[in-house]
Image: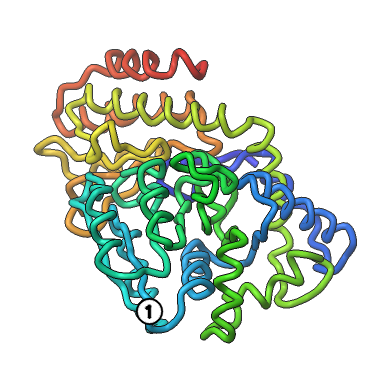
């Protein structure tokens, strides 16, 4: 299937032919042995993605469902949750937890900045928290969290580490067997994500992995205020996909299995290096146009960037101009609406796609009477990725 437009929003992301072909396969019954084999393989590949032998869950739903599953299965009513927020999607944990009677405290950075790990350590000393959420990369700001700094602080306080990997999974390391801070017990407890970002399939799957410690927390809760989001309802299906709880999205599972084969074949080390190179290259090129990334390079996510307009650029006209040329980017959220745009550079995105976008962005700026040098921008782009990826 030929993509008529180049989708460079922070998700959904471009879908490649192998995945479209899988998605278009004949729909079978969810207990058909042929589908069951594919679903089982997808589950095993998910465990490889997170490097875990514990439980993973692949469920019809969005990343928001995965967020809810992470919270409601680990933190009970009246217990305390600490939210480390670097933007809009970090903030979303607050109303989600409030809906279940969970007490929430939020450490919120200015948009484009990180929460100071020392502040996290000090806050964890003031109260007992059952769990702490970390948005690995925030889709609204393009800020990436420092797991190396945060995980040991949280585990030292005895709390569970919940990582929102929606716009990071399959692009950045989320190794659940990795020990942080030279302590074998300091590991990530929950990773949650969605299908439509760096994994690179259409929206529709909520994906979540639990450590043994997180599973123990679920069992200690007993009955929880959830049914569809209760992992105990899904465990039998994940152990044996031939069993039934709720109908799985058959064709999306086909696509997910195909996507994970692509991810694992590339390898996470190479994949992370590619995404880091793409992020740096896009931001270098756009800086040459007089545009300013919201996040400093030291905290910028490899998967997407939030880019502030130079004075005089009209957001709606700019993005409409790009769309007319087949390049789709996203507007910004909250107080940045109209002042910035967001561009994804993750998943199945290639260097040539991003190069095309850099050219078209330059043309759109010229339409609004901004003097830019497209050749200079392309040079900056290629200099950043030359050592890792061939354009």
331 vs 175, left or right, is left
Q: Is residue 210 above or below residue 170?
A: below
Residue at left offset 23%, top offset 26%: 287
317 vs 238, left or right, is left
Residue at left offset 41%, top offset 48%: 152
The picture places residue 253, in percent across and down from the top left corner, at 70, 57
Q: How many marks?
A: 1
Q: Is residue 385 above or below residue 88?
A: above
Give the class, few, some or many, for how many residues have Cα within 10 Å of label 1's Cα (few <14, many ≥20): many
Residue 337 in view: yes
Residue 198 in view: no
The single residue placed furthest to the left in the displayed view is 311
The picture places residue 86, in percent across and down from the top left corner, at 28, 52
The picture places residue 145, in percent across and down from the top left corner, at 35, 45
Instruction: Tell me which corner region of the image, top left, top right, bottom left or bottom right, holds residue 244.
Output: bottom right
Instruction: Tell me which corner region of the image, top left, top right, bottom left or bottom right, holds residue 101.
Output: bottom left
Q: Is disc 1 placed on a helix, strand or loop?
A: loop
Instruction: Tell me which corner region of the image, top left, top right, bottom left or bottom right, holds residue 91.
Output: bottom left
Q: How is the image coloured?
A: rainbow
Q: Which residue is mark 1?
A: 102
Residue at left offset 58%, top offset 43%: 15
Q: Nearer the viewer, residue 127 or 26?
A: 127
Point out the image quarter for the N terminus: top right
The picture places residue 256, in percent across and down from the top left corner, at 67, 51
Q: Nearer the viewer, residue 248 or 240?
A: 240
Residue at left offset 40%, top offset 41%: 148
């Amino acid at each position: 299937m030929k993509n008529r437009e180049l989708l460079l929003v922070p998700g959904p992301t471009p879908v490649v032919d192998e995945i479209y072909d899988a998605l278009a396969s004949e729909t079978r019954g969810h207990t058909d042995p042929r589908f069951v084999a594919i679903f089982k393989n997808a589950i095993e590949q998910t465990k490889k993605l997170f490097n875990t032998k514990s439980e993973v869950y692949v469920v019809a739903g969005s990343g928001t469902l995965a967020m809810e599953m992470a919270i409601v299965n680990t933190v009970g009513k009246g217990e305390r949750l600490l939210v480390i927020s670097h933007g809009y999607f970090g903030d979303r944990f607050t109303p989600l937890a409030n809906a279940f009677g969970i007490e929430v405290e939020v450490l919120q950075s200015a948009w484009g900045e990180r929460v100071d790990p020392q502040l996290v350590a000090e806050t964890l000393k003031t109260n007992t928290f059952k769990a702490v959420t970390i948005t690995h990369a925030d889709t609204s700001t393009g800020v990436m969290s420092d797991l190396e700094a945060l995980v040991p602080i949280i585990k030292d306080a005895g709390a569970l580490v919940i990582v929102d990997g929606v716009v990071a999974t399959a692009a950045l390391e989320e190794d659940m067997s990795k020990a942080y801070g030279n302590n074998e017990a300091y590991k990530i407890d929950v990773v949650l994500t969605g299908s439509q970002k760096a994994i690179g399939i259409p929206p529709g799957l909520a994906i979540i992995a639990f450590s043994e410690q997180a599973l123990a927390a679920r069992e200690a809760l007993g009955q929880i205020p959830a049914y569809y989001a209760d992992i105990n309802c899904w465990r039998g299906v994940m152990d044996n996909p031939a069993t039934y709880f709720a109908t799985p999205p058959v064709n999306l599972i086909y696509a997910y299995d195909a996507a994970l084969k692509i991810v694992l074949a590339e390898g996470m080390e190479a994949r992370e290096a590619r995404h880091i190179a793409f992020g740096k290259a896009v931001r270098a090129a756009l800086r040459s146009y007089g545009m300013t990334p919201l996040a400093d390079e030291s905290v910028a996510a490899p998967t997407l960037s939030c880019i502030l307009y130079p004075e005089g650029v009209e957001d709606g006209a700019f993005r409409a101009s790009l769309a007319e040329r087949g390049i789709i980017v996203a507007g910004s959220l909250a107080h940045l609406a109209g002042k910035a745009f967001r561009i994804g550079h993750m998943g199945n995105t290639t260097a040539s796609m991003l190069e095309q976008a850099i050219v078209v962005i330059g043309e759109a700026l010229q339409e609004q009477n901004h003097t830019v040098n497209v050749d200079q921008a392309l040079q900056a782009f290629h200099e950043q990725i030359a050592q890792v990826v061939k354009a």
